[in-house]
Image (spheres, helix red, strand yellow):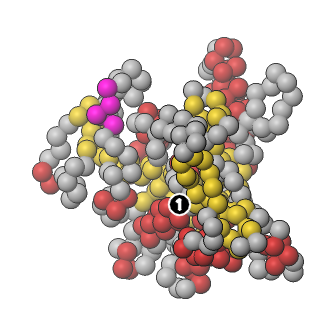
Amino acid sequence: LIEISPALRKKQFETLKCTGSLETFDSLSSPLLAAIKPNPFAAKNNNDDSNSSKNTTVDEDEKLSTEGNVSGITARGTKVYWHNSLDDVPSGPTCIIAHEFFDALPVHQFRRTERGWVEKLVAMNEENNSLEFVLSPGPTLSSSQLVKRRLRKAPSASSSSSDDKKETIVSLEVSPKSIIHWEKMMDRINDEEKNGGRGGAAIAIDYGDEGPLGDTLEAIKDHKFVENPLESPGECDLSAHVDFGALRGVVEERNEDNTSEVKCFGPTTQQKLLLELGIVQRLQKLAETCSEEQLEVLADGCQRLVGDDKVDEGEIPGMGLQYKALCMVSKNLQRPAGFSE
């Protein structure tokens, strides 16, 4: 089980808590392997409920090949390993969870002009000594390569008005890093012999859309949106909506080239995913043993996860439609639950 996330360690222990209640899963699962994150035990903040873990020394034959990997053991005895890269994780059947990961990766932004597709760049305004966005004077290497590749798959080639729709796109956002990481996950679960027959599945859950997307870059500071993402460099969290169509497109391209047999499903809304997985039934089951106060908290949480973000005043805005999920599985696996046609 591999979780890829820019978040702190608390999220990984929430995953262990959920899967630990499933006896079959708990008995068959390998250690949770958290990739692409620093050593969480180096953090000084030990005030969260994930503090049931501790540093530990594993037996010599259990040590991982890459120098610097960090291990720990939870109170339940589950071994946990942290890695800086997915490439460092040992081979084996894999279930990958990438929750709110891709929105944190860098993006390139482009604008259609009379000079062709140009790139949005960052420059220093010497008059007021501040950063500002500018357009490149002409096409850049990135615009000449990335724009063409993304628009080739958008909209669907089956659409009779495909070319007309492409002409209406005046701004475009592309994340090459996202493609690279998604391809690495695809190679990981590909059933081909050269990949060790590892097999498995990967799911990405994030806010985004089918795409292509325009300018979605956002900056958040102190839980509030900042109007100018360049206003306080280094002090804001930057994120961009995930172009799920681009991620699915790379799987389709690899299948057409016969370099992968992975199957891709989605994107679907988080609302549809969780409802099909039984979130309502789960809430009803929990309600049997909850106090009224606990039930109110759970109900509000459920509404937050599956509800619409457009609500009346006083209602809790939901993430059900804004968040999407994309899944890919190795050729031997069926369509996963939550991704019905």
Question: Where is residue 178 shown, x and y percent of the image?
Answer: 53, 60
- Please give the range of residues in magenta: 40-44
Nearer to me, 14 or 335: 14
Residue at 47 percent across and 38 percent down: it is 234
Q: Is residue 269 left or right of residue 26?
A: right
| Count of numbered circles on the image | 1
Where disc 1 sits, the SS reads helix
Most common SS among magenta residues: helix
Vertical side of 76 occupied by 314: above or below:
above
Q: In this view, does 58 lie to the left or right of 136?
A: left
Nearer to me, 76 or 147: 147
Nearer to me, 160 or 301: 160
Residue at 34 percent across and 62 percent down: it is 87
Residue at 53 percent across and 85 percent down: it is 258
Instruction: Give residue 151's quadrant in the image.
Output: bottom right
Q: Residue flagged by tag 1: what amino acid is it? A: Ser
| Residue that mark 1 sits on | 178
Question: Where is residue 127 shown, x and y percent of the image?
Answer: 58, 42
Question: Where is residue 199 shown, x and y percent of the image?
Answer: 44, 68
Quarter of the image with the C terminus is bottom right
